[in-house]
Amino acid sequence: MSPRTLVLGGARSGKSAHAEGLLTDPVVTYVATARRYPDDPDWDARIASHVARRPATWHTVEASTPADLPALLTATQYEDPPILVDDLSTWLVGVLDDAGAWEGDGADVIAHHADALYRSVATCRARLVLVTAEVGLGVIPSTRSGRLFRDHLGALNARVAEVCDEVTLLVAGIPLKLR
């Protein structure tokens, strides 16, 4: 197995840039999990800033459905270029959206996709770097959907961390090696 690294951090902590810096290979497969929203220019600008800082030799793959990411990771070979997934929290938003689960329904669908992702990370043969938001350090969200997201992402992050060789937390742009 090639090394697997999980990079966690809060909003604007530098987690994505740090994860990108871990990969020095000329060719990398960058898996973008964020969906585009037609009436959100701020979101488009955030996506554009991520695209602009990536080397031109990196290949971007958009994981537009929840099943796309596990399928891609499962299909890897040892000789494949390293993979950077940015990020698991936006992937989970897609899972919740597609399951119509923001009010607490769809637990079986969410568990199915989380299990598939966990298995695919555990068996990925290529070098893998995963980015995710750390949601356990803030206040308890005031909305049911916020608590649901925090709980599911916290559980997903813990499971993925179990099968990663390295785990790093970014705080104020400073990487703290957890494993």
Image (spheres, rainbow, N blue to C red):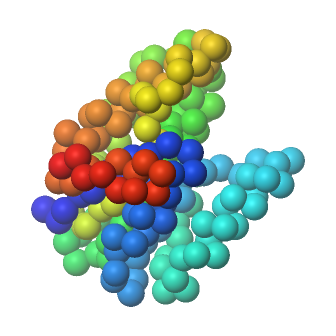
Q: Is residue 75 left or right of residue 103?
A: left
Q: Position of residue 128 (x, y in %)?
A: 30, 62
Q: Quadrant of the N terminus?
A: bottom left
Q: Is residue 123 visible?
A: no
Image coordinates of residue 133 in percent, x first then y, are 47, 42
Provide residue 111's location: percent of width, then percent of height. 38, 25
Residue at the (69%, 67%) spot, across then down: 48
Q: Nearer the viewer, residue 37 or 48?
A: 48
Q: Position of residue 40 (x, y in %)?
A: 82, 48
Q: Can residue 120 be seen?
A: yes
**53 versus 174 height, above or below:** below
Residue at 25%, 67% in the rendered image: 126
Identify the image quadrant of residue 79: bottom left
The image quadrant of residue 166 is bottom left
Q: Residue furthest left?
A: 1
Q: Residue at x 76, y 48 (%)?
A: 37
Q: Is residue 172 above or below residue 77?
A: above
Most distant residue in the right direction: 39
Image position of 164 with respect to 147: above or below: below
